Each structure stands twice: as C-alpha cells, then as structure tokens.
Image (cartoon, rainbow, N blue to C red):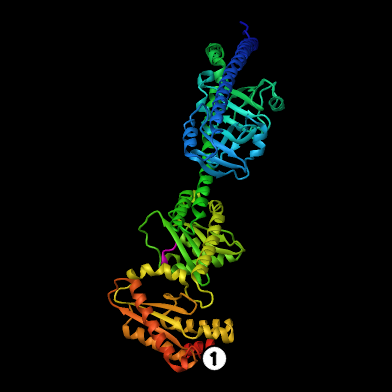
C-alpha cells in the first residue's frame, strides 16, 4: 500500500510572501530614491524660477519709481495741483508698468485721483507720515476708489526747493498684479505669492486668485514628515530663504513651497508646486515599477468594490445633508426680506416642498382672532383650497394641539390626523392630503406665531426634523412682518386723530382715479377757531378738539379714505357714493359739531366723470375757503372776537361715542 505524500504548501506560501515583500521593498526603495532626486531637482528649479520672478518684480517696481520721479519733477512746476493741464499729463501715465492709476497725496491728507477729482483719505493716509519716509513703497493698503479692493502705493515726493509739497502715488492694484508678471514658473503650473512677512498679508496669491487674506490666519497646515509649520513661519518672519512641503486640502496632494526675500520692504516671494508637477518626469518610472505590484492589486479588488458601495452610500447621505443645508440657506435668504417681497414666501415654501417631497406646504400666521395671513404652495397649482371657515377650524385645532407642549404633529393618513385633532372634519373639508407633518412657528417672545405644515409627504420622508431646521427662519419672517407692518402703520397714521396722515394721503391720491366706477367726491373740511382755542385754552384743548372732529368725520365717511392733512384740515374721499348721501353726511357732521359749539367749514366736489383727482380736490378746497370766509364775515365769528371761540371740551370727545351707541 502506497504512502500518501503530504504537500508542504506552507513553505511555498512563505516564499511567495517573502518575494512579494522583497519586490515591494525594492520598488519602494527605488521610488523613494527617484522621489528624493526629483525633490532636490525641484528645489533647485524653484529657487531659479523664484529669483526670476523676484527680478521681474523688482525691475517693474524700479522702472515705476524712475518714471514717477521724472513725473514728480514735472508736477513740481505747477502751483495748482488740480490744474486740468497737469492732470492730462498725469493721467497719460496710468498704464506705466504695474501702475493702474496715479494719485497725489496733499497736505491735510487730501487725495487727488484721476482727472484731479478730490476724495477724502478717511484717515487711512497721512501726508506727514508718508512725506517723512521719502520715496518708498507701501505694504498692502485699502483702495480708496474701489471699496473692498487692495493696492500697493509707490510713493515719490514732489519737491519744490527743500519742501515736499505733495506725494505722488503710483497705485498698483493687487488684483491686477499677476497680469503684470509675464514670467510663468513651471510652465504656469506654479502658484505665485507675495507675502508681507511683517503682517502675513497676501499682496498676491495666484492660488486663490485674490489679493486678500493672511497666511497666518489660514491656520497651521498638515506638514509632510521632516517639515514644521513653525519653521515656515519663523523663516519668513526673519527674512530667510527656505522651503517646506505640506498637504493641500484643495487638491488633496502635497505642495512644495519655496520662499525668498524680494528686497522690497519685508516682502517675501513664494512659489508652490503640486507634487504631481514636481514628480512629473518620474511618473513613467513609477508606472513600470507598479507593474511588479499588480499581484497585490488583485487582493484589493474586492475591497475596492466594497469601498465603492460604501462611498456611494455615504456620498448619497452626505449629498442629502448638503442639499438640506442648501435648502435651509435658500429658505433663510428668501425670508430675509420677504416682509417686503411677499412672493418670496411662496418660493420659500416651494423649497420646503422640495426638501420634504411634499405635495402642498402651508404657512399660517396667527392674529388676534385666528388666521391673520395664509401662504401656500401646492405642486398641483390648480388645487382648490378649502373654504376659509374650514381652514380656520383646522388652524385652531393645530394651535390647540401645540399649546399642549407638543413640538410636532405627524399623521400618515386622515384617520390618524382625526385621532390627534378631534373635532376637525378633515375628510369632509378636504384639509388632509394623504399625510401631514406640522410644526409650530415659534414666537420670538415665546409661544407660537403660526404653523408650518407639509401635506402629502411620502412615508420615507416623514421626518419633522427637516421642518424644525427652518422654523426659526419662518419665526424671523413673522417677527419682521409684524415689525414692518407696525412701522408702516406708524408712518401712515396720524397719532393725534387716529386718521390716516398726509404721507398716506399723498400715496393714495394717484390710485383714486382707478378705484371709482360711478362717482368720486372730495370732502374738504377745516376746523374754525383752532388757533384761537390754542391761544386761549392751550394746545391740549386744541388736540381734544381735533379728536372730536376726526371722530365725526370718520363715523360719517369711514376710516379707509379719511385723512388729516394739516393742523386743522381734513379730507375725506367718497368712492361710488350717492351725491345726496355725501352732502347729507357732511351736513350731519356740521350739525352735530355745532351742537357742541364747534364750527367747521366744508367744501364738497362730487363728480361722475373725474378727469383729474387733483382738480377735484382743489375745487373742494376752494369751496371750503369760500365757506370759511362766509363764516368769519359773521359778527359772532369775527376773528377779532377771539374770546368767543369756545365749546364744551368735557363732553366733546365722549358725546360722539354716545350718539353711535344710540
């Protein structure tokens, strides 16, 4: 009987693993050696390219300074620094080198810019300080012409004898500075920075494409092994030359960063090159070496597919989170000024519908007696809303539900909603559309100022947290809306009389011609004896007189079209009212006031065809003045008998209320 041979597979596996390890080790060693060579070559190239850029910058600045010195001698010959002839010369130099425009800094910190226009330095520039430094180049400063932009100013003194009469400034706009540097390091694949080592401010940053920010305020960077953030910071502050390698969050690879002093102020020029550019020539060699590592890739295939599934799942979740954040931001932005642009509320509700996949979204804002305002958005624009009474009952049911301390309401169908809101006939009134999520809109001072509700939400989206993310924005909208209405009301209401004021009068006049259908009338009323009453019994008595007259006019013609337009002048507009009724009401006002010892002069103009509202009002005003003259022509009402002007103030304000109640 033959003896079975035992296969010793363990030795083969060990040898295989050792061979794989050896291959990987050799590949990594060679790759590391190539990387070190390429890194040394890159550092040398960075140094050469940086010095070329420095030479370009210094040459530009030197040429600019020489041009400015020549121009300063020309300027010194002019006594009037604002002379048009002078500024024709100055403005012709606006494209010299890196200079964008020229300015003159005069004693008293006055700035003359293009065309000799004068602007204030706003305390940003000091003539004495700049003149004391002579010819110099500033660090990064705010642009006085373009708000939010930064510039560097190349100063040259304008001398007249031994006296500095002005400082000529060559303004270099930092946003346009990259265009002036024609040298493109690394075939335009390297980013160029000019940094003020004293402050850390960027003067030029082609990586972020904006001349603003501060290198130290960007925080510490993740450095490659062997490099230190403090090494970079201290080296630049001390004006040294050096380089570091750090990770870039923007492109996800290492950046090789070289810095060297420019020789202007404490400016440092820096270049950064991505690792992929540094090792561009080594990629082919890496590719050949990676062929030997293919066997290792097989082991990663399953892991790759699992990771792909995981990444897609996580990416989808993250995307949903980002979409939610974007929706919240959009809603907040739309509601910021929605109290002035009401259409923004509907757009914001559509965003909420997108976020929750709802068929319909409604915002109810509560008032003193129920629903004050209602905004809705429905995916089917033709959906007919329920009648106001049904909607009012539904809203009150929601408010009672939330008053119990519950911060949300979720109902997946009409039956569940009816259980949570007893007494609300949702099916009959067609309030509920399949499902509902609702949250109270919190009042700034506590409680709830309304309800935000989403109808027809899919089952998988029944998450009230999405609504709670935006309820504060709707709360701010309610607060802004109430504040806006209050301010608008105060601006259009006469506080003393309670009538609309002249601001509202001027605003309403243009629309009256479009409002009427059959007739339009203007009742122009002036109170007789107000001035005399103020002199004899004080302004408090005059104020009470105004309130009494205003109350009678308002009772007769309504508060919607009644105005106090002056101290003792009132205007009422009667829209589509019978002529006799208009005159009878005015006669009734005159009679009732006369019983209290109050006299008014009234003029009425009633027209069926109104060509001009202004003409209508002027005609009524003219009649009022005629009535006033007739009134004062009577001996009993002669203005010279001022002591005769009197009435019963104690009963004047209350009597009208008594008449109305009767």
**Name of the residue lying farthest toward the top:** 2
Q: Position of residue 382 (x, y in %)?
A: 35, 58
Along the horizontal axis of the image, is 501 left or right of 299?
Answer: left
Q: Is residue 547 above or below residue 151?
A: below
Residue 59 in sight = yes
**Magenta stretch: helix, strand or loop mostly:** loop
- Please say whether residue 172 is visible from this viewpoint: no
Q: Secondary structure at mark 1?
A: helix
Q: Quadrant of residue 300?
A: top right
Give the quadrant of residue 591: bottom left
Reply above or below: 150 against 38: below
Is residue 156 shown above or below 32?
below
Residue 429 belongs to the span the image colors magenta: yes
Q: Nearer the viewer, residue 186 or 22?
A: 186
Residue for badge 1: 643
Residue 559 place in picture, x, y as percent: 44, 77
Q: Which residues are magenta?
A: 428-432
Q: What's the residue at 46%, 35% (across, down)?
A: 88
Q: In the displayed structure, would residue 629 be above or below residue 506? A: below
| Quadrant occupied by the N terminus | top right
């Amino acid at each position: 009987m033959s003896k079975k041979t035992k296969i010793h597979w363990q030795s083969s596996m060990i040898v295989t693993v050792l061979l794989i390890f050896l291959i990987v080790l050799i590949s990594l060693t060679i790759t590391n050696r190539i990387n070190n060579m390429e890194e040394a070559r890159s550092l040398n190239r960075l140094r050469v390219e940086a010095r070329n850029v420095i030479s370009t910058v210094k040459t530009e600045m030197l040429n600019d300074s020489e041009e400015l010195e020549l121009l300063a001698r020309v300027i010194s010959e002019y006594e009037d620094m604002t002379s048009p002839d002078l500024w024709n010369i100055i403005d012709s130099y606006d494209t010299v080198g890196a200079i964008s425009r020229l300015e003159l800094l005069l004693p008293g910190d006055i700035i003359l810019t293009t065309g000799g226009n004068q602007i204030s330095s706003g305390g940003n520039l000091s003539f004495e300080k700049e003149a004391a430094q002579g010819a110099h180049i500033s660090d990064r400063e705010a642009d006085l012409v373009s708000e939010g932009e930064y510039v560097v100013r190349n100063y040259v003194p304008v001398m007249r004898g031994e006296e500095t009469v002005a400082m000529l400034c060559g303004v270099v706009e930092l946003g346009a500075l990259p265009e002036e540097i024609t040298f493109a390091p690394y075939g335009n694949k390297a980013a160029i920075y000019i940094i003020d080592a004293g402050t850390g401010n960027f003067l030029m940053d082609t990586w972020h494409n904006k001349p603003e920010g501060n290198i130290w305020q960007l925080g510490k960077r993740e450095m490659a092994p062997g490099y230190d953030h403090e090494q970079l910071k201290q080296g630049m502050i001390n004006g040294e030359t050096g380089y570091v390698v750090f990770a870039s969050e923007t492109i996800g690879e290492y950046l090789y960063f070289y810095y060297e002093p420019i020789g202007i102020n404490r400016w440092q020029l820096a270049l950064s090159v991505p690792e992929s550019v540094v090792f561009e020539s080594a990629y082919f060699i890496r590719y050949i070496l990676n062929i030997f590592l293919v066997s290792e890739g097989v082991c990663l295939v399953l892991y790759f597919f699992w990771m792909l599934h995981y990444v897609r799942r996580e990416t989808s979740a993250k995307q949903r989170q980002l979409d939610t954040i974007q929706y919240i931001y959009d809603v907040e932005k739309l509601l910021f000024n929605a109290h002035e642009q009401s259409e923004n509320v509907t757009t914001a509700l559509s965003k909420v519908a997108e976020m929750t996949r709802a068929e319909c979204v409604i915002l109810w804002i509560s008032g003193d007696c129920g629903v004050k305002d209602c905004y809705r958005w429905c995916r089917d624009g033709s959906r007919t809303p329920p009648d106001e009474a049904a909607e009012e009952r539904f809203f009150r049911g929601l408010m009672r539900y939330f008053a119990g301390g519950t911060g949300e309401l979720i109902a997946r169908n009409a039956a569940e909603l009816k259980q949570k809101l007893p007494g609300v006939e949702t099916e009959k009134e067609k309030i509920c559309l399949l499902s509902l999520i609702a949250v109270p809109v919190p009042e700034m001072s506590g409680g709830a100022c309304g309800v935000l509700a989403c109808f027809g939400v899919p089952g998988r989206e029944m998450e009230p947290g999405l609504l709670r993310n935006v309820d504060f924005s709707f709360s701010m909208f309610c607060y802004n809306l109430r504040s806006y209405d209050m301010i608008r009301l105060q601006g259009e209401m006469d506080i003393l009389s309670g009538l609309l004021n002249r601001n509202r009068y001027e605003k309403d006049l243009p629309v009256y011609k479009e409002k009427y259908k059959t007739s339009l009338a203007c009742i122009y009323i002036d109170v007789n004896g107000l001035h005399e009453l103020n002199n004899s019994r004080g302004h408090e008595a005059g104020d009470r007189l105004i309130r009494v007259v205003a109350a009678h006019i308002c009772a007769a013609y309504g508060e919607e079209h009644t105005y106090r337009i002056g101290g003792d002048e009132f205007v009422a507009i009667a829209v589509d009212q019978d002529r006799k009724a208009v005159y009878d009401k005015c006669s009734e006002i005159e009679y009732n006031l006369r019983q209290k010892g109050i006299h008014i002069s009234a003029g009425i103009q009633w027209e069926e065809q109104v060509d001009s509202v202004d003409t209508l009002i002027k005609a009524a005003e003219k009649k009022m003045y005629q009535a006033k003259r007739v009134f004062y022509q009577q001996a009993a009402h002669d203005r010279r008998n001022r002591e005769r002007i009197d009435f019963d103030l104690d009963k004047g304000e209350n009597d009208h209320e008594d008449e109305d109640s009767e």
